[in-house]
Image: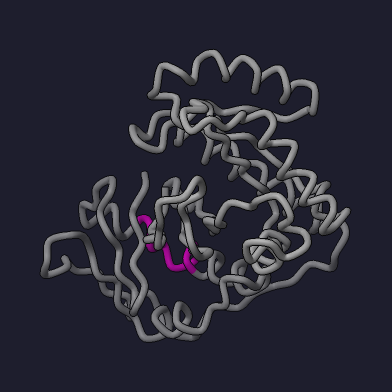
């Protein structure tokens, strides 16, 4: 769903290190998503680098709780849900109250249908939403990402009511400084611009204010619109400085 190129391994939860990517839904609707390695029992006590991963989760506004609905590895998705949320609670009472949405993954497998009913019953009990998805076929991912974007907007509105309004000023360079051209490899487009490349290089995507500023300037410069004018297509890569993003319409 983003430009993330996570390092993976053959474990139940395959991501090894947290990876950041920008999800673009079009019409200047973007947000930063972090792919966090799966937690295991004892994570709140540091087992399996749990503290490192939990610190990353603390910086998020919404948690997409991905469950393996197929259960083909002998795991119970409902049991996994409660175990992981218990680790969140043991680590931080505040983190345990973070907004969540459940992604019931591997819906392309026939075994998932029966477990989905149990997941939906559990989610209804906990007051959470469930989105059946397949990372393999991309089924349901669009609806999930749009819902997460809306949840983030609701979060921002709540935060703005509680905190003084902050106004961000864009860099002094003009839109004429932004150039977009085809990547020589044919994989996508290269977006160039002194201030934009500097912004990407200096942005700390683990910092909330830095992320907001990045998104603000991205929208202000109309980069999504410019990319569409150049004929960008779903799945094309966007290169800015040393970073690579995957375009999602």
Q: Quadrant of the C terminus?
A: top left
User: Is 118 positioned to the left or the right of 91 in the image?
Assistant: left
In the rendered structure, the answer to whether residue 37 lies left or right of residue 107 reads right
Looking at the image, which is closer to me, 153 or 39?
Answer: 39
Q: How is the image coloured?
A: one colour
Image position of 133 (left or right of 108): right
Residue 171: x and y in percent read 51, 83
Say above or below: 187 vs 110: below
Q: Height in image: 213 above or below 70?
A: below
Where is residue 202 drawn, in percent x and y? 51, 84
Tell me which residue sits at (58%, 51%) in the image.
Answer: 38
Q: Is 206 within the magenta? A: no
**x 50%, y 45%: residue:** 12
Q: Quadrant of residue 45?
A: bottom right
Q: Residue at x 33, y 79 (%)?
A: 241
Q: Quadrant of residue 64?
A: top right
Which of the pair 45/185 is nearer the observer?
A: 45
Measured along the vertical axis of the image, is residue 116 above or below residue 218? above
Q: Residue 22: percent from the left, percent from the top? A: 47, 59
Q: Nearer the viewer, residue 17 or 223?
A: 17
The stretch of residues the image draws in magenta is 218-225
Residue at x-position 40% and y-position 56%: 9
Q: Residue 197: x, y in percent? A: 39, 81
Q: Is residue 223 magenta?
A: yes
Residue 232 in the figure: left or right of residue 60: left
């Amino acid at each position: 769903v983003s430009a993330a190129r996570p390092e993976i391994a053959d474990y139940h939860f395959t991501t090894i290190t947290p990876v950041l990517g920008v999800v673009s839904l079009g019409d200047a609707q973007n947000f930063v998503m972090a792919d966090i390695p799966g937690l295991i029992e004892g994570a709140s006590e540091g087992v399996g680098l749990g503290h490192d991963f939990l610190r990353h989760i603390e910086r998020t506004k919404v948690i997409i709780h991905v469950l393996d609905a197929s259960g083909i590895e002998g795991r119970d998705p409902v049991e996994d849900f409660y175990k992981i949320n218990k680790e969140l609670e043991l680590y931080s009472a505040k983190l345990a109250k973070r907004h969540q949405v459940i992604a019931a993954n591997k819906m392309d497998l026939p075994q998932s249908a029966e477990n989905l009913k149990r997941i939906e019953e559990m989610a209804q009990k906990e007051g959470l939403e469930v989105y059946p998805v397949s990372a393999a076929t991309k089924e349901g991912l669009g609806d999930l990402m749009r819902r997460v974007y809306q949840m983030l907007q609701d979060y921002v509105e709540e935060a703005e009511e509680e905190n003084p309004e902050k106004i961000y000023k864009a860099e002094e360079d003009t839109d004429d400084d932004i150039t977009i051209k085809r990547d020589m490899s044919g994989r996508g487009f290269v977006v160039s611009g002194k201030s934009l490349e500097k912004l990407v290089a200096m942005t700390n995507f683990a910092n909330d204010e830095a992320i907001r500023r990045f998104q603000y300037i991205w929208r202000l410069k109309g980069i999504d619109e410019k990319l569409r004018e150049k004929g960008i297509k779903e799945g094309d890569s966007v290169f800015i400085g040393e970073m690579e993003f995957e375009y999602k319409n």
